[in-house]
Amino acid sequence: MAKRILVSTRKGLFELGRGRGGWVIKDDHFLADNVTLALHDPRDGTDYAALNHGHFGIKLHRRDKGKKAWNEIASPKYPPKPEGLDDKDGWGKPVNWTTQLIWALETGGPKQKGVIWCGTMPGGLFRSTDRGDTWDMMESLWRHPDRNKWLGGGADIPGIHSICVDPRDADTVRVAVSCGGVWVTHDAGKTWAQSAHGMKFDDGPASEVESPDGQDPHMMVQCAADPTKFWVQHHAGIFKSVNDGKQWTRVHAKPSSFGFGVVVHPEDADTAWFVPGIKDEKRIPVDGALVVTRTRDGGKTFKSLKKGLPQKNAYDVVFRHAFAIDETGDMLALGSTTGNVWVSENQGDSWQLVSSTLPQVYAVRFA
Amino acid sequence: MIKCRMAKVYFTSNLRRHVDCPTVVVVGKNVREILAEVFKVNTRLETYVLDDQRAVRKHMRILVDGVAVKDLTGLTDTVHSKSEVWVMQALSGG
């Protein structure tokens, strides 16, 4: 069972640990700075933290196992933009070839010690083979002609927020793009193909609603023990795939299918959790009551889990990375835009409030 | 004879919180050359001031003798003898 939770917030990184009475804040790092994402690498015990300094750009820090100090390491860097290149996104806006957000950090395969994947805005995917000392851009994806169809959804620019390294073969990697669908490589990034077929929007021109390249998966997860199966919390609802992401089908949940985060049980692909909001233009919990929805039958039915969560005047939004599950599948953590953090040790049946006074939470991660 | 242009480069305290960058005197005839001299001995500082395309970061400002540089990508603005160059952040909220 996980011993720590890393909580990335607008004003620092907070480290939670389990005390006698439950989970508490044990430590803080980068206080007052904007920490947008963290990663714990179970292969060697390293922690990583991504910061967005605004003025000074995007930075990555690393802390070795058992050490107190963080050290700044290299941040993913875009290659020089060819002179005269008219590079525009799907909205027709010029693309700035500069890392503007680290939006995904994942470890490589179990045998690929030191390999880290990083997804960014405006859409670059990077891989390090030396624990972040250096980064290589996946130019095969960046220079794919369909990349120019990608566009910003809630953000102004597109980005890669989900990276699933296949547990069967670490050369197979799937990434989800807001907005740009799902992309898969089976040769460690030499070639890429679109894999969002079946996803669709409710509104829009007929030619666009089912176009894979314009889909807006908010978050994508893969079941570790049953890796042909995936879940996506999409802008227009919930989608699942049972055939390696080749085809996606829609699932409907109550009280809503709109949201950002999704987690899947590591051993049971039919069990997944979501945090619903009302809908796109009303991004608050339904009736001011925060619930987590859980399916145990692959999306046929959902149960609303609310014990320990506020059921009145709650306006928490849970960002896509602010919802996590541990490797046992029993523990979940949830952080919100209003600075609340909850932990469940029983698959969401009940929740413990860890803090209601943290800064806006961007991400939670078990460690 | 080419006249040597010695500029004094200052960094704001906000930047010095992240990177050790004391005031330095360097030689150069424009902002690009001046900064290149600074970054030669302080490589980490470059990523805080310039973006991936080596343009001035969106929310950074560079002033030469109190005047904001105009060429934010080429950094060709002239630096004179005894110029004072300030590397600072623009104001922001949050």
Image (spheres, coloured by chain):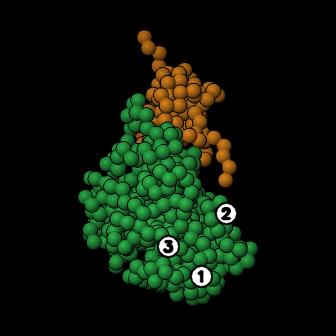
Chain colours: A green, B orange
- Disc 2 from disc 3: Cα separation: 20 Å
Residue A51 in picture, x, y percent from top left: 52, 56
Residue B21 drawn above or below residue A261 = above
Amino acid at circle 2: Lys
Q: Which comes sooner in the sequence, label 2 or label 3?
A: 3
Within-10-Å neighbours for mark 2: few <14, some 14–19, many 20+: few
In this image, A172 relative to B43: left or right? left
Q: Is residue A303 visible?
A: yes
Which residue is drawn at the image coordinates 46% and 49% (left, top)? Answer: A150
- Disc 3 from disc 1: Cα separation: 15 Å
Q: Quadrant of residue A23?
A: bottom right
Residue B33 in picture, x, y percent from top left: 45, 28
Give A198 or B8, whichever is nearer the viewer.
Answer: A198
Amino acid at circle 3: Val
Which residue is drawn at the image coordinates 59% and 83% (left, top)? Answer: A305
Pointer 3 residue: A251
Q: Quadrant of residue A87?
A: top left
Amino acid at circle 1: Ser
**Quarter of the figure with the N terminus of chain A:** bottom left
Q: Secondary structure at mark 2?
A: loop
Pointer 1 residue: A304
Within-10-Å neighbours for mark 1: few <14, some 14–19, many 20+: many
Residue B56 drawn above or below residue A227 = above
Q: Chain of mark 2?
A: A
Give A267 or B58, whichever is nearer the viewer.
Answer: A267
Residue B85 in picture, x, y percent from top left: 57, 30
Q: Chain of mark 1?
A: A
Residue A89 in picture, x, y percent from top left: 47, 43
Pointer 2 residue: A282
Q: Secondary structure at mark 3?
A: strand
**Quarter of the figure with the C terminus of chain A:** bottom left
Which residue is drawn at the image coordinates 50% and 56% (left, top)? Answer: A209
